[in-house]
Amino acid sequence: MSWNVNELLRKYLIFGSQNCRHDPEKVLEEAIKGGITAFQFREKGLRSLEGEEKAELGWKLRLLCRKHSIPFFINDDIDLADRLEVDGIHVGQDDMSAQELRKRFPDKIIGLSVSNDREVEQSPIKSVDYLGAGPMFPTATKEDVKPVVGVQWIQKLKSNYPDLPVVGIGGITTSNAYQVMEAGAQGVAVISAVTHAHNIIETVHKL
């Protein structure tokens, strides 16, 4: 399936089992009902699954996305990319180079996280389909989180790369998502705002 990157970034949900208070499949089902436009499987960090358990959960979530025509991304785990038949791969600065990824997966959507000018300068921007910009606001979801860059970072990226889609991430909630969109982002990426929500469907609607 051919995806419009600008559209799929609009409500981009990211999580692994370690982020969920309830069954991950149920969380994803509710989020899909609410209107997410993409999902990234990020099974990483404290209390996360490994090996076959990780692969099995990934496949269940992948099938849910396929059933509802939601693009399915994986975070960093190159070994699982083929096995889970992913639509895209998202990497950070310490993961496999986006340039190497493009050679290995010429037909996948590739996203790259950037947090400052130095990272942009050292990144193969021409090899990626979109940039993940953040952290937008303070967040406690990820360990070793980088300094908050604010929505000004999106404005700068869009000024320098007007044709490259950008999604904001980090501390985004239903209360501040509009600031990210007004800064010029194509969408917002969220984790705990949805996975910890009392009403997931309503929360996704509000994003």
Image: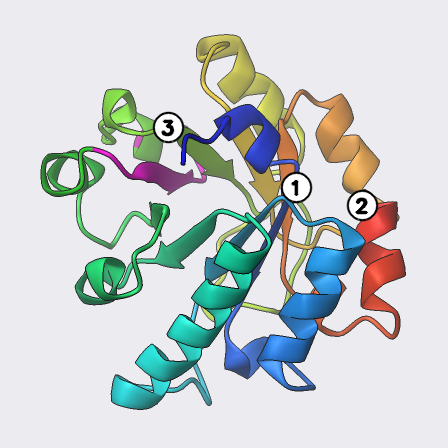
Q: Position of residue 33 (x, y in %)?
A: 76, 58
Q: Is residue 115 magenta?
A: yes
* Residue at image mark 3: 129
Q: Quadrant of the N terminus?
A: top left
Report crowding for label 3: few under 14, some 14 to 19, many 20 or more residues within 10 A (C-alpha): some
Mark sitting on residue 207: 2
Is residue 174 visible to the viewer in this orientation of the structure? Answer: no
| Residues in magenta, as a range | 107-118
Provide the residue designation for mark 1: 188
Examine the structure image and report whether residue 68 is included in the region drawn in magenta: no
The reply to whether dot 1 and dot 2 touch (C-beta < 8 Å) is: yes
Answer above or below: position of 90 versus 187.
below
Give the tally of numbered discs.
3
Look at the numbered disc 2 and give the secondary structure of its residue. loop
Residue at figure coordinates x 18%, y 33% from the top left = 106
Q: Residue 56: which quarter of the image?
A: bottom left
Q: Secondary structure at mark 1?
A: strand
Q: Mark 1 or mark 3, which is nearer the start of the sequence?
A: 3
Q: Is residue 71 left or right of residue 108?
A: right
